[in-house]
Amino acid sequence: MTAKNVSIETLAVHAAEPRPARDRSVVFPIYQGTVYEIAPDGGVDYLRYSNTPTQTYLHDKLAALEGAEAAVATASGMAAISTALNSVLASGDRIVVAGNIYGGTHALLTEESRRIGWGVDFTDAYDPAAWAAALTPRTKAIYVESITNPLIRVGDLAGIAAFAREHGLTSIIDNTFPTPVLFRPHELGYDLVCHSATKGLNGHSDLTAGVVTGTAERIERVRHYLTLYGGSLDPHTAFLLARGLKTLAIRVRAQGENALALARFLEGHDAIAEVHYPGLEAHPDHARAVELFNGFGSMLAFRPVGGLDAAERLLKSLEIPYAAASLGGVESLVTRPAISSHAKISAEERAAAGITDDLIRFSTGIEAADDLLVDFEQALSD
Ligand SMILES: *Cc1c(COP(=O)(O)O)cnc(C)c1O
């Protein structure tokens, strides 16, 4: 089964499920063993090598969803990203980063990259001239996120993939926010797609995992470094992630409908100063999101009228969402990036990036949209 002959809803449920089912079990079992008898061809199956049955089953499912030849699961999103980078960059090589990136990835590519010896050139995600200006003979890769946090921007993703091809760079994209339900970067030519599966892929805020997808050859390299550094995913978590994946498509659609309803409601509310959601016509990347994505996702950000005090009052008054970081789960979550995802960045840098202290980020769950709107209505009138 591939994305070419069935829809992602069907893939989420049926891709990689063996037919006939193993032992007639409709649900793929958890092979918890760390080691297997030596195969007739001499092959060694071992959990850290990421080649045991439940791991392989999960890999096949993830590859099908991203429309990739191969996938390898990792113990976290950061393990996916760091291992993907290890598979591409040697000491002395350089990477171009286009646009804002997740805080953990930013720390890896600033502090840790100095120790490893990777050169990093930060550019923006909209300006091909800036990417070209950053190129050096040692530049090996370009890195981007498909939707950025917390202002929910969508860079020139097609342009970046084409630029990478033209200059022989490996293109790497973090596709955590949209998930493959909304966007499949390999179709644009991206070489390696990374996810924090902790977020939307699993969708239940109850495990930590990651994945890298790409050609079999590239993923074999990633798996090599994963085995060396030891960030493999254990089978029990692999099983839970595969279970979460079966409802991925309907969860992401429900979240997207809720997020759009909430964004429109907030956009029309007198107590709200600004709303950032790519599904709104007023969002600067709306046209690009329409062109590239099958929907606008679960994430939005907004500022209330009245500054920080109003933002804190609103956070206290909302009854349905948890005040918590992270995203992509079935439960709505609400945070202020200035004290969560962007707390380590200086106030000046935050202000320059438009991340004011009163900015609120919302990760929409699968609750009824009307209940979320009623909750906001009461919280905003407090
Ligand atoms: C959470 C997140 C990560 C890191 O994932 P972990 O599973 O926490 O290691 C990377 N990229 C993005 C966009 C994220 O949201």
Image (tube, rainbow, N blue to C red):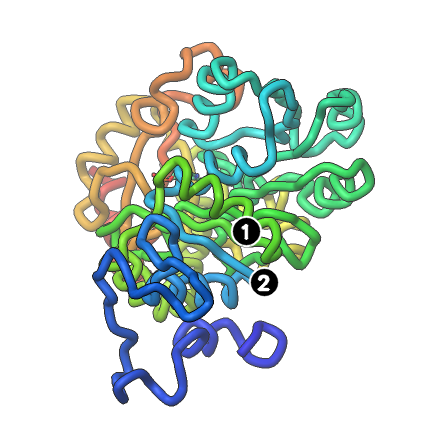
Is residue 245 rendered to the left or right of residue 154? left
Residue drawn 70% across and 52% down?
Answer: 189
Tell whether label 1 touches label 2 (CB within 8 Å): yes
Q: CA distance from mark 2 to mark 1?
A: 9 Å
Residue 47 in percent (x, y) is at: 31, 53
Number of labels in the image equals: 2
Is residue 356 rendered to the left or right of residue 382? right
The kind of secondary structure element at disc 1 is helix
Give the labeled residue for mark 2.
Answer: 69
- Quarter of the image with the C terminus in it: top left
Residue 146: image tag? none
Q: Amino acid at mark 1?
A: Ile
Q: Quadrant of residue 129?
A: top right
Q: Amino acid at mark 2?
A: Glu
Is residue 110 rendered to the left or right of residue 49? right
Residue 107 in percent (x, y) is at: 44, 22
The kind of secondary structure element at disc 2 is loop
Residue drawn 51% across and 45% down?
Answer: 222
Q: Earlier in the sequence, mark 2 or mark 1?
A: 2
* Residue 74 visible at all: yes
Residue drawn 45% across and 75% down?
Answer: 15
Figure quarter occupied by ligand 1? top left
Label 1 CB sits under 8 Å from any ligand 1 atom:
no
Give the labeled residue for mark 1.
Answer: 219
Mark 2 burial class by Cα count in 10 Å: few <14, some 14-19, many 20+: some
Mark 1 burial class by Cα count in 10 Å: few <14, some 14-19, many 20+: many
Vertical placement of 103 versus 189: above or below? above
